[in-house]
Amino acid sequence: MDYTTLNVNSSTNKTPTTAAQSSGAADTQDRFLKLLVAQMQNQDPMNPMDNAQVTTQLAQIQTVTGVGTLNNSIQSLSGQFEQMQALQSVSLVGREVTVPGNKVAVADGKATMNFDLSGAADSVKLEVLNGAGAVISTQDLGTMKAGSQSYTWDASKASETANLTFRVTATKSSNPVTSTTLMRDTVRSVSTTGGTLQLELKNSGLVDYDKVRALG
């Protein structure tokens, strides 16, 4: 794994932006003060600016400068957080994670399939499909609550166990209930692309880190 990539990608884009913003804030403040001085020098002697007006304008420029400084601080913290997150994710290499997916892994004649239901269902059907997309097994799981669900399929009598996938159909009072199929996969490496932290998984390829539902 290229650890250098983790350190470089999460920080190289921050410095030019921060420097430019700091320069922009300083230029804005300088222009404001010059305009204020010019305004005071050319004011009507019979109707000069009162202290309240001057104080208000000075407060405005201080607010603008303060917002710019706060924005720079937030960006700096964001960069540090991204770098820390990337370094911490290195420990995931070799571990199993649960992510959205529908591939079926058969081991010792059994396969455990996980899925998530958006709501309670009074009818749940799980189908196992072969590589050609044909259904080779159908399981009626009956009533299920909302949330994470798991089903272990006995594949000992299945005619084929390679390149299998599964799908879940759930309904409540004949209305469809959204289901998300999940699968366990092994982390091979970690990368950052465009500031996005991604995991390269054994079977699923590149997956965004925020797609991970659980760690094995």
Image (tube, rainbow, N blue to C red):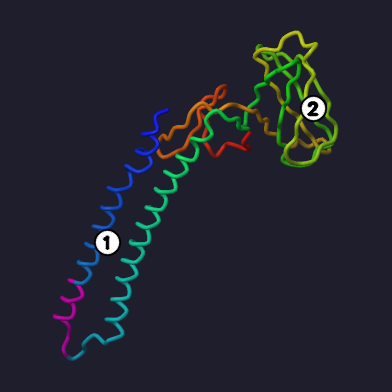
The amino acid type, in three-letter code, at marker 2 is Lys
Q: Secondary structure at mark 2?
A: strand
Name above or below for residue 205 compared with residue 180. above
The answer to which quarter of the image holds residue 213 is top right
Q: Is residue 82 above or below residue 152?
A: below
Residue 207 at what x, y percent from top left? 53, 31
Closer to us: 89 or 174: 89
Q: CA distance from mark 1 to mark 2?
A: 61 Å
Front one among 211 and 6: 6
Disc 1 marks which amino acid?
Ala
Residue displayed at 68% across by 21% down: 104
- What's the residue at 50%, 38% (across, down)? 89
- The tag earlier along the polypeptide, 1 or 2, is 1
Q: Which mark is residue 83?
A: none
User: Does the segment drawn in magenta span residue 25?
Assistant: no
On the image, numbered disc 1 is attached to which residue?
25
Question: Which residue is under mark 2?
Answer: 125
Where residue 17 appears, as percent x and y from the top left, is 30, 49
Asked whether the residues under the numbered discs 1 and 2 touch, taking CB atoms below 8 Å apart as contact, a structural biologist would say: no
Residue 194 position, x and y percent, is: 40, 37
Query: Which element type, helix, strand or loop, lies under badge 1?
Result: helix
The secondary structure that dominates the magenta segment is helix
Question: 34 above or below 188?
Answer: below
Q: Image check: 13 left or right of 39?
A: right
The quadrant the C terminus occupies is top right
Residue range highlighted in magenta: 34-45
Task: Farthest residue to the bottom: give it.
Answer: 46
Q: Exactly how many numbered labels are in the figure? A: 2
* Left or right: residue 188 compared with residue 192: right
Tell me which corner region of the image, top left, top right, bottom left or bottom right, holds residue 63. Answer: bottom left
Picture coordinates of residue 171, whole percent (x, y): 79, 35
Q: Residues within 10 Å of mark 1 (few under 14, many from 20)?
A: some
